[in-house]
Every structure is written in structure tokens, then in C-alpha cells.
Amino acid sequence: MQRFLVQRLIITLVTLVVVSVIVFVMARASGDPRGLLLDDYAGPDQWEKLGEKLGLNKPLYQQYWIFLKDAFRGDFGESVREKRPVMELIKDPLLATFELGIAAFILSLIVGVPLGVLSSVKRNSLWDQVGKVVALLGQSLPPFWLGIMLIFFFAVKLGWVPASGREGWSSIVLPAITLGWFFVAANLRLVRSAMLDVLDSEYIKLARAKGVSTTVIIWKHALRNALIPPLTYMGITLGAAITGSLIAEVVFAWPGIGRLAVSAMYYSDYSLLQGIVIIFTVLYLAVSLLVDVLYAYVDPRIRYT
């Protein structure tokens, strides 16, 4: 188990370094921020002075090395546009996005997994048909349209929850449904498919012949052995729910980090853009590492592959 974890940690660190190089290069390929920060009347001296202040006059490899050392300390410098530390700008929007992503992920689990299990156990029944409809709608409805419809019915017409903003727990309900609905459908279909394969296996038939209760067969034996494919997607779901919440943030005016990233890209704010992407990458890699550990727990054979 220890060897398995060490291997995954090394892969995670190498991936993080590679991503940092890509982020560093792409940020500088987007344009020189001095073109946005200086007006048309700025002279060469002002151009050079600002370049020296931002570290743009040094060779690229020196800029990258400085960036890498500071990033490992959690220091992404100062925002070019806001003139404030990057971590100070990221902290609150990141917390808001994290809250929204976790809420959408929990929704995808507590709705998608039980519905998937129920659809597989009640194959071709009314419950199965309901599950198929939920999966179809979840993967076909555009998130922005779904968000607008939720606002219209539940916020405007019924007045049950706020239409936008981040004010109390009720304001997260509609954005979480908008973001998590697709993942509910995907988890439902994956769990149903995996459970159907397991329920038709010989050892499940043997357990039934021995008189093991249906509840134990479904939730202890069948679900655990059917978890590998859904577990893979759940890891992707958590990462995507946290990093892919831009549409929900725009529709519901949620003060998350997605809109901050768009603004940083528009203004060629190197430091802010790099900080956002690196933090997103760390979150994704942490989720991936967690999924690998869960793999080894669910199926011990994976530790030795």
C-alpha cells in the first residue's frame, strides 16, 4: 500500500510541475500586460520601468524559476490590475466556488447513486423508467437554460429561494442544482449499468441461494463491486464541479472564482491567472489522488498493479 501511494504522489508532483510550465508559457503568450496598464502616451522609460517592476525584463527561465519557488510557498505575487496580493483576491471567491462545487457533488451522490441502484434492482419497472427520464433530461438540458428556468419558477413565481447572490444557505440551492444536474444523470447511468453487470454475476446468485438478505446483497456485495466505474467518474465530478462552475456563477451572480479567472484572462493579469490555474490544478490532482486511494480500498488487487 505504501509503495502504491508513493508512486501516485510522484506522478502527482510531476504532473503539477508540467502544468506549471504550461500555465507559465500560456500566460505570457496571451500578451504583455503593459499594453493594458500604460496609456498611449507612455514613453520607453515608463515601459521599461514597469517591465522591471513586474519582472518582465528577465529571461523566461529566470521568471519561471522565481514563479515556481514562490508558488510552492503559496505566494503568487501581486495582481497586475488590482495591486493586491493574489491570494487575498482568490481567497473569498475560491471559498464560494468550493461551497458551490461541494454542494453540487453531494447532490449528484445523494440523488444519482440511489436512483441508479433502484433502477438496476427494479429493472424495467416504473422506477427504472423514471431513472431513464432523469438521466435523459440531465444530460440534454443546457445548464444555462436550466438555471434560468429554476430562477423563473422557484425564485420569481414561488419566491422560495433567492434568485441570485450568496446570502445564506437557501441561495446555494438553485446554483447547486444547475451545476449538479448533469452529474446526477451521469452517476445514475453509470451506477445502473455497473450494478446490472454485478447483479447478473454468479456469486450474487450463490449469495441469494444461501439465503443472504436482499438488502445485504445489494448494498454490501453488489454495490461495492460495482463502484469502480462510478468511482472514476465521481472523482472527475468533484473536480469538474469545483473548477467548472462558471455558467452557474454567471447565471446566479455567484461571487466565485470562475468570473475572476475570465477577468484575469481579459486583462492579461499574469500573476492572478497563474494563481487561479495552479490552485485549480492542485485541487484536481488532490481529487485524483484521493480516487486512487479509494480504488485501492475498494479493490485491493489494484494496489499490486
Image (spheres, grey):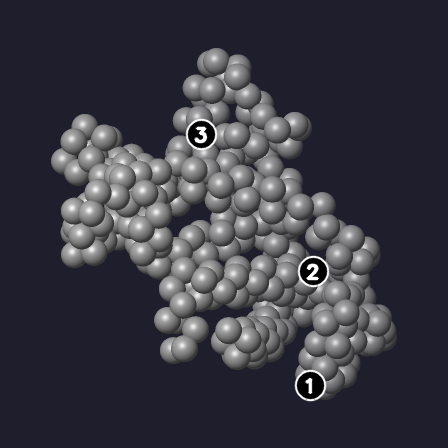
Mark nearer the N terminus (3 vs 2): 3
With respect to residue 22, does 236 lie above or below? above
Label annotation for residue 24? none
- The reply to whether discs 3 and 1 touch (Cβ–Cβ < 8 Å) is no
Within-10-Å neighbours for mark 2: few <14, some 14–19, many 20+ = many
Where 233 sits versus 3, above or below? above
Reading the image, the residue beneath label 3 is 148
| Amino acid residing under circle 3 | Ile
Q: Residue at x 48, y 44 (%)?
A: 105
The residue tagged with tag 2: helix, strand or loop? helix
Lower position in the chain sequence, tag 3 or tag 1: 1
Q: CA distance from mark 2 to mark 1?
A: 19 Å
Residue at mark 1: 61
* Cα separation between marks 3 and 2: 30 Å
**Residue 28 point in image, percent of width and height:** 63, 73
Is any part of residue 8 visible from this angle? Answer: no
Residue 245: image x %, image y %? 52, 46
**The quarter of the displayed image where residue 274 is located:** bottom right
Q: Is residue 144 left or right of residue 44?
A: left
Judged from this view, the residue extending furthest toward the front is 210
Question: Horizontal and vertical percent for residue 260?
Answer: 64, 50
Q: Which residue is mark 2?
A: 272
